[in-house]
Structures are given as structure tokens and as C-alpha cells.
Image (tube, grey):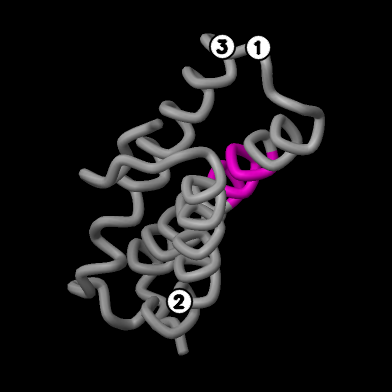
């Protein structure tokens, strides 16, 4: 069992839950980029960091995962990291455009 976003989840449910949340953030990024006050957008960094940290900790503590379980958990860490980097890049570009007086369309 692992707690994530106040939910106690077994491994199978943890993987399913993380994949669905990551997909939500991935697909929602383009739709939400104009709505910076969106609840899901503001909670994304918290979830992404928490998700990566807890799964990394789980992989360190438990060594009895099958190869497929370990691969799924590592995939979640990588996907969360990619989303974080994508968001940082977008924010950096937006700041640069704002500083230069360029409006994004």
C-alpha cells in the first residue's frame, strides 16, 4: 500500500491511478494553458513531485517487484519528469515572451 493524494492504493491501483492522472495532465496541458487558475493545473506540480518521490522511495525499499511492475513504476517516474520539464519549458518561454513584449497566440 502507498498513499498518494490522500488515497491508500495497492500496487495495481497505484499504477492505474498514476497513469490516468498523468494522461489527464498531458492531455489537459494544451487546453489549460490559457487558464492558469485551473484547479488541475495548480495541483499538477504537487502531484507530479509527490508521485515521483513516493514511487522512487517504494522502488528503493521494496526489491521484490517483478520486471513488469518495476518497468511500469519507472515509466511513471519518467512520464512525470517529462511533464514537469515540458511545463518548465513552457513557463520559461512564456516569461521570455512576456519580457520581450510578445503575445502568445
- Say if mark 1 contacts mark 3, CB within 8 Å: no
The x, y position of residue 35, in whole percent, is 27, 80
For the residues marked 1 and 3, what is the alpha-carbon distance in whole angstroms?
7 Å
Who is closer to the viewer here, 49 or 95?
49
**Element on which disc 3 rests:** helix
Residue drawn at (70%, 35%), measured in percent from left and top?
69
For the residues marked 1 and 2, what is the alpha-carbon distance in whole angstroms?
34 Å
Q: Is residue 8 above or below residue 34?
A: above
Mark 1 or mark 2: name the one nearer the start of the chain.
Answer: 2
Provide the residue designation for mark 2: 28
Residue drawn at (45%, 40%), measured in percent from left and top?
10
Mark 2 or mark 3: name the one nearer the start of the chain.
Answer: 2
- Say if mark 1 contacts mark 2, CB within 8 Å: no
* Mark 2 vs mark 3: in front: 3
Who is closer to the viewer here, 26 or 4?
4
Provide the residue designation for mark 3: 60
Q: Is residue 69 above or below residue 98?
A: above
Q: Quadrant of residue 59?
A: top right
Residue drawn at (36%, 36%), measured in percent from left and top?
50
- Please give the range of residues in magenta: 75-82
Provide the residue designation for mark 1: 63
Amino acid at each position: 500500500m502507498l498513499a498518494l493524494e490522500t488515497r491508500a492504493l495497492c500496487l495495481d491501483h497505484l499504477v492505474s491511478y498514476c497513469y490516468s492522472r498523468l494522461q489527464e495532465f498531458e492531455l489537459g496541458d494544451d487546453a489549460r494553458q490559457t487558464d492558469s487558475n485551473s484547479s488541475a493545473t495548480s495541483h499538477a506540480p504537487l502531484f507530479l513531485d509527490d508521485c515521483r518521490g513516493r514511487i522512487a522511495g517504494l522502488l528503493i525499499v521494496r526489491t521484490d517487484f517483478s520486471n513488469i511492475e518495476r518497468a511500469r513504476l519507472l515509466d511513471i517516474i519518467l512520464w512525470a519528469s517529462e511533464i514537469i520539464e515540458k511545463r518548465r519549458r513552457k513557463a520559461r518561454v512564456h516569461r521570455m515572451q512576456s519580457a520581450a513584449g510578445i503575445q502568445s497566440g
